[in-house]
Each structure stands twice: as C-alpha cells, then as structure tokens.
Image (tube, rainbow, N blue to C red):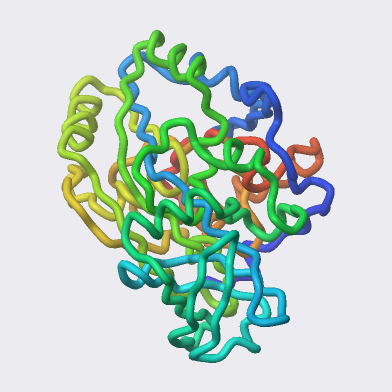
Amino acid sequence: MKVDLFDFELPEELVAQRPVEPREAARLLVVGDRLLDRRVGDLPELLEPGDLLVLNDSRVLPTRFWGRRGAVEVEATLVEPAAEDAWWALARPGRRLRPGDRVELGRDLVAEVAAKDAEGRVLLRFDRAGEELLAAIRAQGAMPLPPYIRRPKGGDPRDLRDYQPIQARVEGSVAAPTASLHLTEALLDRIAVRGVERAFVTLHVGLGTFAPVKVEDTAEHRMHVEYGAIPAATAEAIERARARGGRVVAIGTTVLRALESRAREDGRVEPGNFATDLFVTPGFRFRVVDRLWTNFHLPRSTLFMLVCAFSGLERMRAAYAHAIAERYRFFSYGDACLLDRREEAA
C-alpha cells in the first residue's frame, strides 16, 4: 500500500508536551460504528464483566545522556544493548565520533566508541558492565523521550515518573508503551470491580517501533526486531476469556503486536520468549485482540498503519479528522482512543 494513504495534517500545537493531570481526566475517543467523545475515567463502564485487559509490563530505562568528547558536547541515547558492557546508541553529533574516541557521559560514565553501523548508530563500550552499568544508567540517565516532546538539556526529572507506566516491572524498554501512561491504580481497581480480569505480556520497546517510514510503499518497510515474553498464565487467561464470551482488550499497540505475533491459526496464544518484527498493515488477519486502547499516532507511522488495519482505513481517517477538529492532544503524552476491531479492515 502507498504510504501516502496514511498521511494527514496535524497542527503542531496539538502535540502534547505534558500528560493531563489527573490522568483519568484525559480525553478518550471511542471508535466503533460511531464516534463517542468520553474521558479516560469512563473506561470501566466501556468494558463488560468477563473481558480481559492485557498490559505490557516492560519498564523504561532512562537511557538519554549528555556529555563530552574532549571539547565537543555530545548527546547520546542508548537504544539497544550489545554486550554486558556495550550499547548501540544514537549520538549527536554522530558523524564526528570515530572508533577509539573517548566519550564522557552523565556524572562519571566513560565509554569508548567501538564501532559505527550503516544506520548511523555508534557502539559505546563502557568502563563498567552488567548490573554496575545498569545501576549507573538508572541513576544518571534521563528518559528517552521522543523528539516531538521538547525538554531542556539534561532532561526533566518529572519525566522519570510521567513516562513510566504504573505496571512497569521488567526492565528493557528504551521507549514507553505509552497507552499505559493513562492508567492509575484507582482506575485499575474500578476495572477489577467491574469484573474484568487482568493479564500481562512483556515486549521491550525499541526505538525502531517509532522509526519513520522512509519508503513509498509499505511492502518495502522493515521493522526492527523487539524481544519479549508471554507467560503461560496470560495464554490461559485468554482462553478463559474466550470460553466465557469475553473480549481481549489490548492496552497498547505493543500488547497487540506481542499477542498477534504468538497467535496460532485457531486464535490460541503460544506462551514463551519470542522475538518479533511484526508489521501490521490493512489486510492483516487478527486472531486474538478484540479491542485496542491506544494513543493518537504520527502521520505516516507504522502505528497509524496498525490502527487502520485494526479498525479500517477510512474509519480511522475520519476518527483522526474528528480528533483534530475537536482539539484532542496527540502522541505519547496525549489523549486516548478505544478501538473496536473491524473484520473487513482490509
């Protein structure tokens, strides 16, 4: 499909720079046979007893750093671990870094540029390894916010809380599964009282999920590989929900991609560790997820393509036009959508 089909004009002022407080006050667009303007706090009444909520429990590491290479200022975002003592990173100014250069990051992290790759990433080999390196990253790094969220040099400590889902517990993501940022303990408690079960998957989010699509046809785009795990208990919870007539509600595109990556032909989910480069575009056959809770995504992005596959291209184009006209807030810190699956979404 032509990537231009997934383009739209978005006023810059609709890109959210901070989350709404309280979180439950954020706006919610329900997309089904018709559009409903609601609030995040309305989610419990939009679910039915017997439904199953599935969340991603991956935890974001604060992998953005500022430092120096000699007299040159350097900004580096660690995007993929390569060894106990090494990470691939996006660096600025990356072109001026050469193998053998010494880079000082944060307060006392020191790394050597070990290599560069065809994508422009640099391989940083640090002066410590394993848990010692992870502890330094946790203590000294800033959250790796997407570039459309503007922050001063050094980051903002508030983002250490704001950009971390409340259910996060398994370290490994370098970007947040942002649909979960709307959830609070109080909201989850109300959902449980409603008779909705809860289960978890892990999919460690890489920056590749948000990489721009630079080709003209979706068939030419390649997703980066991401890693995760589906517990046996989650696969069993999905079977129980199916047996009682409940719906599987994915909290975020990462959950949908995890479940659909491990789906058998009969809709059963295969538990275990996995790697996925699943790219969902219109025509994809969904086997597991019935409803999707997500944010508003970038034009021409793989995530907007996914929601169009799930609910239909024309339906989602109409929904986004409505959201823009009604001044919904977009992207990671923005408002939410609750989407019904549309079987004829090809």
Note whether 198 is above or below 154 in the view shown.
above
Note whether 179 is above or below 50 in the view shown.
below
Q: Nearer the viewer, residue 207 or 115?
A: 115
Q: Nearer the viewer, residue 196 or 226?
A: 226
- Which residue is at 60% across, 47% downward? 316
Viewport quadrant of the C terminus: bottom left
- Which residue is at 31% across, 35% downward? 200
Q: Residue furthest front?
A: 108
Residue 41 vs residue 257: left or right? right
Note whether 253 is above or below 47 in the view shown.
below
On the image, the x and y values in percent for residue 297 come to 62, 51
Asked if residue 153 shows in the view, the reply is: yes
- Which residue is at 67% across, 80% downward? 93
On the image, the x and y values in percent for residue 310 come to 46, 48
Quarter location, residue 147: bottom right
Asked if residue 308 shows in the view, the reply is: no
